[in-house]
Image: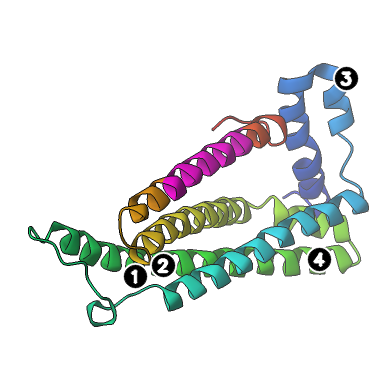
Amino acid sequence: MPSPHQVAKHATGFVSHKIFAMRGGAAVAEMAQMPPSADALMNMMTAMSSYAVVGSLLMGSSLYMFDVAPTKFKEYEFTQSKSGWIKKIEKTAIIAVSILSAISIAMALRTVIIFQFMTLYGNTALSRKAGEEAFALFWYNKLNIKLRSDAFKSFLISLQTFHASFALTVFLNTDGSHRYVATAAVIMIMIYSATNLRQMVRLASRTIYGYSL
């Protein structure tokens, strides 16, 4: 049975070696055999905590959106039209805002909890006597990797549902012909932002983490 030191060496050395060998050749792979320094590990923890901070801000924004947006029919003054189709769209938008805001809040909360606890336990591992080995056993565990991936997906879901609920809130809180212009402008900006985020995530996946999305 391998010792904790052997497992840690395998996690910090061999895995990185395999990734860098595919991307940078033997010279880069040789450098990857070196385990991360304490400063590098602390930087990883700082980056991890940043997700929790952004998730907290996103959750706060979603909570505010849920508070200011109309979520009940009796709270909203519907637009009257001969065909009644505008009223139907507004009712649908009110229902959608409630659902999307709730999903955004729940997913942001999940993101904050997972990343915050990972930061806490990662820093705890580094503070122990065999800090780097304990950290490697914790950080490169399959369950930890899966949780980090799931938490990031929760963050993306929270962000996109927030975008959608914001666009619908703009639609509900404006009237007249300019409501369609304002809503369309917001949707276009949101789509452009989502595209930029996707491009950035794919770039980071290829250049930092060594795989493609």
Residue type pointed to by label 2 = Ser
Q: Is residue 198 magenta?
A: yes
Specify the amino acid type for callout 1: Ser
First in sequence: mark 2 or mark 4? 2
In the image, 81 versus 103, the foreground residue is 81
Alpha carbon distance from label 2 to label 4: 33 Å
> Which residue, given by chain and number where applicable, does mark 3 sit on?
27
Q: CA distance from mark 2 to mark 3?
A: 50 Å
Lower position in the chain sequence, tag 4 or tag 3: 3
Q: For label 2, count other residues whose C-alpha is less than 10 Å away and answer few (under 14), some (14-19) or many (20+).
A: many
Q: Secondary structure at mark 4?
A: helix
Mark toward the viewer: 4 or 1 = 1
The earlier-in-sequence mark between 3 and 1 is: 3
Name the residue at 62% across, 69% down: 56
Q: Name which residue type carries label 4.
A: Asn
**Marks 1 & 2, CB-CB < 8 Å contact:** yes
Displayed quadrant of residue 172: bottom left
Front residue of 55 and 10 = 55
Residue tagged by mark 2?
A: 101
Judged from this view, the residue extending furthest toward the left is 83
Which of labels 2 and 3 is toward the front? 2
Asked if the residues shown at circle 3 and circle 1 are in contact, with their CB atoms under 8 angstroms apart, the answer is no
What is the span of residues highlighted in magenta in the rendered image? 185-202
Find residue 205 and report its image quarter.
top right
Q: Calculate the distance from the C-alpha at mark 4 to the C-alpha at mark 1.
A: 38 Å
Answer left or right for 170 relative to 91.
right
| Tag 2 and tag 4, C-beta contact below 8 Å | no
Residue picked out by circle 1: 98
In the rendered structure, the answer to whether residue 81 lies left or right of residue 123 reads left
- Residue type at tag 3: Ala
